Amino acid sequence: MDFLELAQSRWSVRNYDARPVEQEKLDRILEAARLAPTGANRQPQRLYVLRSEEALARLRAATRMAFNAPLVIVACAKVDEAWHNERETVMRGTTCDTYNVAEMDASIVCDHMQLAATEVGLGTLWVRGYDTQSILDAFEFPEGIVPMCILDVGYPAPEAKPSRLHEDRKPLSQTVVEW
């Protein structure tokens, strides 16, 4: 499958089959994460793979965003390792000292993992709709490690299907400006 076909076939899965994810598939997904670009190649990502019943129960108690996936990857960042753009003085109309790309790095890593999972027949859901403190309270992450996003991974349940919005894409003329 070429890249655009792969990207087209990826969709947000919110209902998973109970089948476990095979180790070789997980290894491929994690290797895709390792190869993802990060700001100044700092690689601040720390990936916590949750698949034990205890770990998944703790996550599900902290957020409804696990959608019963048999495997969840909590993409964190060691924020002080991430690149800071010290030339950035304005962001979204507010002033800031520097711009830390930790969340962007984690999102790029998750995107690579989503595409690798799709390639091996798995479904995913990239999640940011949770309270960070709830995740921090549920797990004992080392000092300086901050959850940035969650990636649910598994086989889509037989009745699962893409959202009605999956195919709803704006034309390039509405999203691209050439100067």
Image (tube, helix red, strand yellow):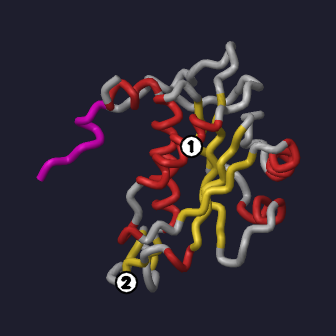
Disc 2 vs disc 1: Cβ atoms closer than 8 Å?
no
Q: Which residue is most to the front? A: 24
Residue at 67% in and 56% down? 48
Amino acid type for the residue under numbered disc 2: Glu
Q: Is residue 160 left or right of residue 92?
A: right
Disc 2 element: loop
Disc 1 element: helix
Which residues are the magenta region? 171-179
Residue at 48% in and 73% down? 82
Viewer-proximal residue among 86 and 51 = 51
Check disc 2 and report the residue beneath it. Answer: 86
Q: Residues within 10 Å of mark 1 (few under 14, many from 20)?
A: few
Check disc 1 and report the residue beneath it. Answer: 27
Expressed as whole percent of the image width and height from the top left, the position of residue 69 reads 72, 35
Residue at 71% in and 62% down? 132
Viewer-proximal residue among 143 and 89 = 143
Expressed as whole percent of the image width and height from the top left, the position of residue 57 reads 86, 45
Q: Is residue 37 left or right of residue 67?
A: left
Residue at 71% in and 78% down? 143
Expressed as whole percent of the image width and height from the top left, the position of residue 109 reads 48, 53
Q: CA distance from mark 2 to mark 1?
A: 35 Å
